[in-house]
Image (cartoon, rainbow, N blue to C red):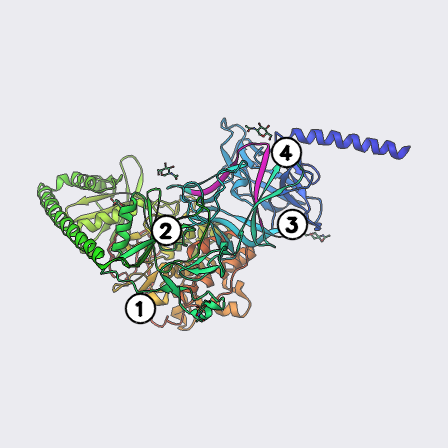
């Protein structure tokens, strides 16, 4: 009897309690969430609370589907810091920060947002946990949201992709296993190399790519547009690139989840009236979905035996090996190409696009122009036209998959030696010669006209220089929206370039601080007349720099042209440069580890933007601590693109006669052979990273002992198993040690001797942002460092530059 009574009481409590908890979807300042209680979204779809995964006894804070019989967790907060008892408490602070604590120690927390009057934590019906200002009229103004930090599950309305303005990436990462939600090495997100697409990675290796977006789906995924459950979109614009899906009918749910054990991405669906999740799709769905199964120029076809076929016009490079199922050698052209005498194209249909690393893209080109363009470029091996985006591939074509159904894949046009009748081809060649001659004549005529007009304008005098600049610009295809400052304005702002206002002197000119009439502070780079830059080159540079806009790049406000004089006007950075902090005994204490880590991430994102995301693709070539400026909030901004040289779409490496850069930051292959690439920038980034961690200048080590510069030192400590000794003691004592060690590890990966072994900046950004295992670094590239360094000696000044900066390299936009 008694038992029954107690049972009854307990039941009442439970019912009462569950009633209470369904009513609550928010926590405000004075409230908290303890283990055993849950927040439930308004419509009852999702719950937030503590749970133990699988057979584990650890407690995690997570979000799961509320009303489902089997707990399906979709998000975990403290993935890598489990709580081992039930004392966890979730709170929101007045700064808008969410903190998960045990006995007043934070286990997990979000970044501090700006101070908020009435911060509210709310679990939305979408499964998104958000922080917003309770007093803000717009409830969609999130200060923080869990959708920005996905775990292993993608929900409707979630964007998986990259914010191109900030470089912020949202990627899924699998749970290690059923019992452990910490991130495994299987991740899913946008691949930014070339044209964006979606892809799975295992560690840093590509594992399965979606192929290019072809308007109604991805070329590498069977078209499921007409499915009754969900709709999807891939968005790529100037600001962001992401994949998103939405439910067609709210009564059928759908989610995408990664599974580390099986190395797959699965989509499940659940009808309201059923109790179990049904598998809807799985990727990779067959062997051909895996990355590069068939080697170069192979075509993976699951309906053929063997699955690997050579593309039409190609034959196996090594027939014996090919016959014994070793496809790694791939295929080569059956007959050699002959670019001069004219090649032809054949169409292969229903295929997944080849992977793109060095694409050439034109967003407003029809298929005919695209074909002509590809034919002219001897390195162009294939082209495709996706809704007026012309895409061309150079080099080997890899990762192609053959589909069977007409609704899948896309058309790809592959370059082959012309096999049609010689006559036909000759006629074509003749015709194209005639056309080319006519075009050349026209162009010549036009340029003469332009030249005459230009010199007439020039002779009208300087007073009109502003107008000339604008008018000429209008002739060009892209209108440059850039302020052109009058010389008088600049002279006034800088007190006629007074010595007091001088911030620095470099090989290419001086930098002055100025204050405009409206009070805005500016930095003026007055290029020396000896820089040899003509008006056109200057304009190219200005246009180039103006196009580069990123949170972690110094912003170009405008320019000024006065006779021979050329000036660039930048935003002014009150905190000067990174080296003025990290190498200064007292000021260095301002930069705590968390601030330094933020700075490192910022530099990495800025550089990634230069390398990949900006439309121009730029190698900086002179990245160093003194070229990283800090704004009033200590946000890093990379400066000095005066040395950057853009490189064409299919050119990632170049050889240069004029070495610009600063010894001590230069990669060995660049310092000795003048070979620069994105990977030489990665090397410089590695040095900057080491400097930020150690608080020491690379040169400093060199001068005291020839054989022990900063890299040698760090490498030695690494091999001796005490890498943390490379860091500033003050950081080791006060900072996040695992994060610090991770950064040392990453810096050593960046300064490896062989450029191809160094990670790309996109990998570096991934490494900084995740906890996945890193590869072991190989021997760093310090062996070539056997000439005295001449690192710059004027610290902390915008535009300061070393004597090694021989010249201002010419800039070419694509
Ligand atoms: C739980 O973790 C704390 C430190 O976080 C430790 O002191 C304690 O011994 C652990 N308890 C158990 C049961 O493992
Ligand atoms: C991955 O899939 C396996 C096999 O279906 C399953 O046992 C395991 O629980 C899954 N892992 C996760 C983290 O869901
Ligand atoms: C093609 O491009 C246009 C303009 O860029 C866009 O509006 C349209 O939606 C695109 N069509 C497809 C099928 O992607
Ligand atoms: C959604 O699905 C339910 C149940 O299958 C159906 O009754 C309803 O009509 C559907 N709603 C729409 C808008 O299609
Ligand atoms: C490979 O196999 C094909 C078809 O079975 C055969 O014709 C060819 O001779 C084989 N080549 C070599 C090198 O074994
Ligand atoms: C793209 O193609 C169009 C048409 O041929 C051409 O006018 C334009 O200059 C090209 N744009 C780029 C960036 O090459």
Q: Nearer the viewer, mark 1 or mark 4?
A: 4
- Above or below residue 165? Residue 289 is below
- Mark 2 against mark 3, which lies toward the viewer? 2
In the rendered structure, the answer to whether residue 152 lies left or right of residue 557 reads right
- Percent x, y of residue 68: 67, 37
**Disc 3 residue crowd, few under 14, some 14–19, many 20+, Cα 10 Å:** many
Q: Is mark 4 within 8 Å of ligand 4?
A: yes
* Res 318 visible: yes
Which element type, helix, strand or loop, lies under badge 1?
helix
Residue to which mark 1 is pinned: 673
* Label located before the other in sequence (2 or 1): 2
Can you identify the residue that label 3 sits on? 82
- Mark sitting earlier along the chain (1/4): 4
Q: Does the magenta segment cover residue 373?
A: no
- Earlier in the chain: of badge 4 and badge 3, it is 3
Mark with earlier residue (3, 1): 3
**Residue 275: percent from the left, percent from the top?**
67, 38
Rendering quarter of residue 491: top left
Residue 412 marker? 2
Q: CA distance from mark 4 to mark 3?
A: 33 Å
User: Is residue 176 rendered to the left or right of residue 353?
Assistant: right
Q: CA distance from mark 2 to mark 1?
A: 38 Å
Q: Nearer the viewer, residue 609 or 593?
A: 609
Q: Which residues are magenta?
A: 241-258
| Cα–Cα gap, marks 1 and 4 | 66 Å
Labels 3 and 1 touching (C-beta < 8 A): no
Q: Are marks 4 and 3 in contact (CB under 8 Å)?
A: no
Q: Label 2: few (<14), some or many (≥20) within 10 Å?
A: many
Q: Label 4: which residue? A: 272
The residues tagged by marks 3 and 1 sit, at their Cα atoms, a distance apart of 50 Å
Q: CA distance from mark 4 to mark 2?
A: 42 Å
Disc 1 and disc 4 in contact, CB within 8 angstroms? no
């Amino acid at each position: 009897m008694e038992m029954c009574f107690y049972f009854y009481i307990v039941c009442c409590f439970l019912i009462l309690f569950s009633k209470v908890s369904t009513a609550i979807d928010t926590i405000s300042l004075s409230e908290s969430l303890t283990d055993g209680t849950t927040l439930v979204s308004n419509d009852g779809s999702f719950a937030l609370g503590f749970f133990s995964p699988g057979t584990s006894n650890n407690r995690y804070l997570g979000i799961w589907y509320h009303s489902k019989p089997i707990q399906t967790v979709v998000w975990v907060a403290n993935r890598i810091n489990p709580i081992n008892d039930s004392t966890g408490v979730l709170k929101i602070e007045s700064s808008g920060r969410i903190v998960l604590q045990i006995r007043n120690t934070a286990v997990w927390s979000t970044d501090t947002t700006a101070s908020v009057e009435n911060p509210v934590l709310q679990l939305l019906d979408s499964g998104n946990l958000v922080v917003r200002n309770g007093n803000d009229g717009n409830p969609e103004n999130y200060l923080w949201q869990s959708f920005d930090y996905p775990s292993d599950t993608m929900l409707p309305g979630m964007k998986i992709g990259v914010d191109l303005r900030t470089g912020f990436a949202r990627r899924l990462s699998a749970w290690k296993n059923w019992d452990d939600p910490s991130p495994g090495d299987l991740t899913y997100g946008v691949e930014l190399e070339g044209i964006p697409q979606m892809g799975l990675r295992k560690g840093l290796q590509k594992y399965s790519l979606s192929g290019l977006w072809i308007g109604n789906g991805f070329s590498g995924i069977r078209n499921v547009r007409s499915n009754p459950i969900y709709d999807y979109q891939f968005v790529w614009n100037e600001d962001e690139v992401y994949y998103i899906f939405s439910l067609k009918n709210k009564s059928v749910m759908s989610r995408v989840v990664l599974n580390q054990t099986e190395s797959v991405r699965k989509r499940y669906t659940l009808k309201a009236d059923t109790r179990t999740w049904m598998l809807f799709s799985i990727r990779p769905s067959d062997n051909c979905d895996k990355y590069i199964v068939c080697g170069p120029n192979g075509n993976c076809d699951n309906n053929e035996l063997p699955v690997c076929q050579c593309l039409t016009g190609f034959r196996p490079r090594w027939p014996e090996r090919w016959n014994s199922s070793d496809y790694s050698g791939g295929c080569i052209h059956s007959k050699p190409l002959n670019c001069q005498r004219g090649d032809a194209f054949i169409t292969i249909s229903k295929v997944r696009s080849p992977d793109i690393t060095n694409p050439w893209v034109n967003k407003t080109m029809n298929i005919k122009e695209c074909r002509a363009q590809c034919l002219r470029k001897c390195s162009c091996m294939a082209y495709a036209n996706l809704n007026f985006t012309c895409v061309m591939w150079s080099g080997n074509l890899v990762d192609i998959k053959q589909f069977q159904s007409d609704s899948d894949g896309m058309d790809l046009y592959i370059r082959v030696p012309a096999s049609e009748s010689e006559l036909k081809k000759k006629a074509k060649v003749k015709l194209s010669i005639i056309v080319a001659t006519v075009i050349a004549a026209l162009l010549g005529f036009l340029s003469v006209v332009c030249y005459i007009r230009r010199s007439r304008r020039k002779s009208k005098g300087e007073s009109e220089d502003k107008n000339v600049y604008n008018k000429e610009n209008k002739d060009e295809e892209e209108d440059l929206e850039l302020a052109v400052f009058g010389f008088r304005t600049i002279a006034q702002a800088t007190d006629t370039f007074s010595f007091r206002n001088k911030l620095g002197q470099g090989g290419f000119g001086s930098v002055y601080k100025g204050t405009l009439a409206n009070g805005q502070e500016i930095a003026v780079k007055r290029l020396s007349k000896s820089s040899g830059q003509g008006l056109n080159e200057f304009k190219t540079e200005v246009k180039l720099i103006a196009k580069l806009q990123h949170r972690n790049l110094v912003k170009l406000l405008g320019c000024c042209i006065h006779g021979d004089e050329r000036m660039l006007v930048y935003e002014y950075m009150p905190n000067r440069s990174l080296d003025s902090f990290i190498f200064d005994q007292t000021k260095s204490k301002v930069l705590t580890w968390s601030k330094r880590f933020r700075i490192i991430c910022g530099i990495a994102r800025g550089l990634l933007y230069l390398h990949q995301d900006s439309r121009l693709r730029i190698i900086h070539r002179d990245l160093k601590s003194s070229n990283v400026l800090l704004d009033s909030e200590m946000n890093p901004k990379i400066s000095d693109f005066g040395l950057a040289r853009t490189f064409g779409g299919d050119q990632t490496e170049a050889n240069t006669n004029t070495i610009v850069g600063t010894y001590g930051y230069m990669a060995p292959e660049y310092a000795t052979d003048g070979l620069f690439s994105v990977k030489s920038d990665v090397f410089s980034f590695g040095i900057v990273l080491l400097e930020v961690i150690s608080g020491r200048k690379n040169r400093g080590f060199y001068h005291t002992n020839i054989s022990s510069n900063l890299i040698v030192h760090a490498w030695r400590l690494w091999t001796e198993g005490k890498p943390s000794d490379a860091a500033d003691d003050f950081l080791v004592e006060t900072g996040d040690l695992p994060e610090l060690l991770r950064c040392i590890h990453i810096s050593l990966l960046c300064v490896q001797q062989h450029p191809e072994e160094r990670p790309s900046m996109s990998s570096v950004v991934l490494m900084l942002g995740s906890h996945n295992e890193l590869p072991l670094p190989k021997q760093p590239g310090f062996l070539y460092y056997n000439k005295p360094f001449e690192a710059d000696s004027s610290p902390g000044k915008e535009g300061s530059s070393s004597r090694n900066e021989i010249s201002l390299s010419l800039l070419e936009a694509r």
